[in-house]
Amino acid sequence: IDVSTPAQLKTALSEAKAGDTIRLADGTYKGNFRAATAAGASSRITLTGSAKAVLSADGGYGLHLDGASYWTVRGITVTGGQKGIVADAARGVVLDSVTVHGLDMEGVHFRKSSRDGVLKDSKIYDTGRDGRGMGEGVYVGSAGGTGDKSDNVQILHNTIGPGVGGENIDIKEGTIGAKIIGNTFDGSGLTGAHYDDSWADIKGNKVLVEDNTGKHTRNNGYETHSQQPGWGCGTVFRNNRSDLSGAIGPDRYGFHITNYQAADCPVTITADNKVTGGRGIATPGVPIG
């Protein structure tokens, strides 16, 4: 299905069936776009275009995958608006090589139990422009309870920042099994307005953080928190490179583990993590290696 106007795109999104591919011509598509049809794991729906195919919103969500399970979105740019790409109750969504920027709030949000999502090889920058510290690059789950089971989201080989006005990544309580691997973080947009002072906040369980590189943070590299009892536990940090040069916060650790309990809320920080600048690799009392 070849598309070159906003009206054609809206029609294609609403009429797409499992197995379809929607191809966007280069150009600017003004509006808010929504897909609400679920495809299947073996017959996905694909929305594809180059980075010059730009969804440009003026408020609201740029692209809302609302129950649109097993969609692949590849190559396009999403800008303007309040939030960039939001997946709600959408399982197995793949966001591949997308560019998301120029937003009031967060860039990409997996929400309402959007399990098994993937964000890979993408660029997210210039978010949270309203200055409230709510401009996370990637947001997984929901705050204020543990009902959102957006489990097993994989965030792979993305470049997040600069200009992200919140954590580059926020993994919320209630979610399990997120993987954050091979990303490049730039925290130069952190505001400190809403506790945003690290590249990633880990509040979910059994999260793997591996092979990431970060620079420009206000305080810490990565943080774990128990926002709800029994959550924010079991994180594994492996082979990350953290440059805390220029950090001005009170802690300045590569890994600020606020909730460590050896038996009840473990964390693993392997000896191959490298931290330069700051006050040390991890919060005192947390084992390394």
Image: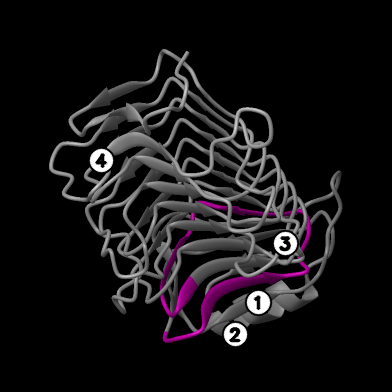
Which residues, given as a range, are shown in magenta?
Answer: 58-83
Q: Quick check: marks 3 and 2 in contact, CB under 8 Å? A: no
In the picture shown, does residue 106 fall above or below 174? below
**80 falls in the magenta region:** yes
Q: Check disc 1 and give the amino acid type.
A: Arg
In the picture shown, does residue 235 fall above or below 30? above
Residue 34 is labelled as: 1
Q: Could you tell me how far apart the alpha carbons at marks 1 and 2 are, in whole angstroms?
A: 12 Å
Q: Could you tell me how far apart the alpha carbons at marks 4 and 3 are, in whole angstroms?
A: 29 Å
Q: Quick check: marks 1 and 2 in contact, CB under 8 Å? A: no
Neighbourhood count class around disc 3 (C-alpha, 10 Å): few under 14, some 14–19, many 20 upward: some
Q: What element carries label 1?
A: strand
* Residue wearing tag 2: 7
Tell which of 9 and 232 is nearer to you.
Answer: 232
Residue 181, percent across and down? Answer: 51, 32
Residue 181 is labelled as: none
Toward which corner of the image does residue 215 lie, by quadrant? top left
* Residue wearing tag 3: 146
Q: Check disc 3 and give the amino acid type.
A: Thr
Q: Could you tell me how far apart the alpha carbons at marks 1 and 4 are, in whole angstroms?
A: 41 Å
Tell me the residue at 37%/47% (across/down): 199
